Image: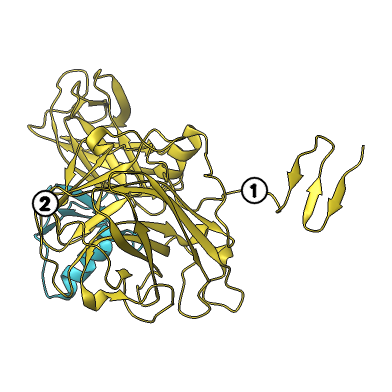
Amino acid sequence: MYKLLPTNEFGKTTTVQRTTGNVFIPFDPANTDFQEYQKWLALGNQPLPADAP
Amino acid sequence: MTIAYSGDSITFPDNSVQNTAPKVGMVNRIINGAMVIDQRNAGASVTISSTAADTYSLDRWCAYGNVTSKFSVQQNAGSVTPPAGFRNYIGVTSLAATSVGASDQYYVAQYIEGFNTADLMFGSASAATVTLSFWVRSSLTGTFGGAVNNSAVNRSYPFSYTISAANTWEQKTVSITGDTTGTWLTTNGVGLRVHFGLGVGSTISGTAGAWAGSPFISATGATSVVGTSGATFYITGVQLEKGSTATSFDYRPYGTELLLAQRYYVKLTDSSGASNALGLVQIEGTTTANFVMPIAMRAAPSGTSSGLTISDGSVTPTVTSLSNFGNFVNGVGVLLTASGGGLTIGRAGRIRIAGSTTAYLDFSSEL
């Protein structure tokens, strides 16, 4: 399962959290964890929303 | 002073003879081939339990099993004496007698970044021959297998080797004619994969010694290590080099090898509880901080932590989550969120990997 993390100071979401292992994953196409997240999304899954600031 | 040559040999004034051109630069494309560096586990055993992705054990070395908990990986497992010239090895121990299905796969592997294989010219008519050499020891004997692959694993070169005597170190050499077809990345993606099979099903095993356009990760008929409970498979001195002959192992200085490994994984620990970084409390309950890496990482890294605290001089809450708020050439900006709040906006946040042997902050950009 994944969960979006709060936006950065510029108002952009740049990170998703893999809740198993509490891993933060940057939105970088070269990051293999992000590639796995993209595959997970392609299966129709949706991440949990970010917590309210 | 004279330098004489005869046939293919050059004789120098000190009577030393050079038969081939000396290799310079990064001879060994494998990083941590002597199994010296184990940032993640510091020599502890890892049971391969993820069936979704590779699990990294010693630096740069990953392992995979179709079914969870069928083998473990550990630096110097079993505490046997390594081959002469080495102090470490990666040790696989089978945890059950596992039947390997036609499409099952159990392996240890290293994936080499494309920037470090670009000169091999794979995928072109100029593809270079490469040679893989390694020391191996197993409680089993027979024919074992592995494979070299491209990133997409649609180009495969299965190889086999024979272990003649049980529980005895043997050095093996495999020469591989460069692949003139297929797509081989020369970027920060996977340039080349090297698999050592521990039990690989028939549909993903192929004929040894030939390139194939199929996803083979071992040789047909290879011995299954995971098929025997308690079986061991140890390997070290792994070298992949350009050329058709194996040269002596390319020992690099420890600092160099560690830096090469840290392009893919950095683990910060500090059991003394000293301050590890300074950040700024910009939002109540959080701190932003830049972490400068020892070397530019391959890609923006993922991260995890345990046992981190932040102190603003008044309160010291525990960090509950991290997120990436930006990347720069050789580092990453991290937003650390702490439980309980209380951090005062505008103050510095002193980040500590809080005085415990299990506390850490790590960054990974593995392939």
In the rendered structure, the answer to whether residue B53 lies left or right of residue B262 reads left
What residue sits 45% from the left and 51% below the top? B30
Q: Is residue B216 visible?
A: yes
| Subunit of label 1 | B
Nearest the eye: B339 or B219: B219
The percent position of residue B286, horizontal first and vertical second, equals 19, 36
Q: Determine whether the residue tagged by mark 1 lies in a helix, strand or loop.
A: loop
Q: Which mark is residue B229?
A: 2
Q: Which mark is residue B24?
A: 1
Q: Badge 2: few (under 14), some or many (20 or more) residues near its Cα, within 10 Å?
A: some
| Subunit of label 2 | B
The percent position of residue B237, horizontal first and vertical second, equals 43, 45
Q: Is residue B287 visible?
A: no
Nearest the eye: B47 or B249: B249
In the rendered structure, the answer to whether residue B215 lies left or right of residue B255 reads left
Q: Earlier in the sequence, mark 1 or mark 2?
A: 1
The percent position of residue B192, horizontal first and vertical second, equals 43, 64
User: Which chain does the yellow colour mark?
Assistant: B
- From the image, state the color of chain A: cyan
- Determine whether B2 is above or below B357 in the image: below
- Determine whether B141 is above or below B213 in the image: above
In the rendered structure, the answer to whether residue B94 lies left or right of residue A13 reads left
Q: Please identify the quadrant where the N terminus of chain B is shown.
A: top right
> How far is disc 1 from disc 2 in space, using C-alphas?
43 Å
What residue sits 36% from the left and 44% below the top? B169
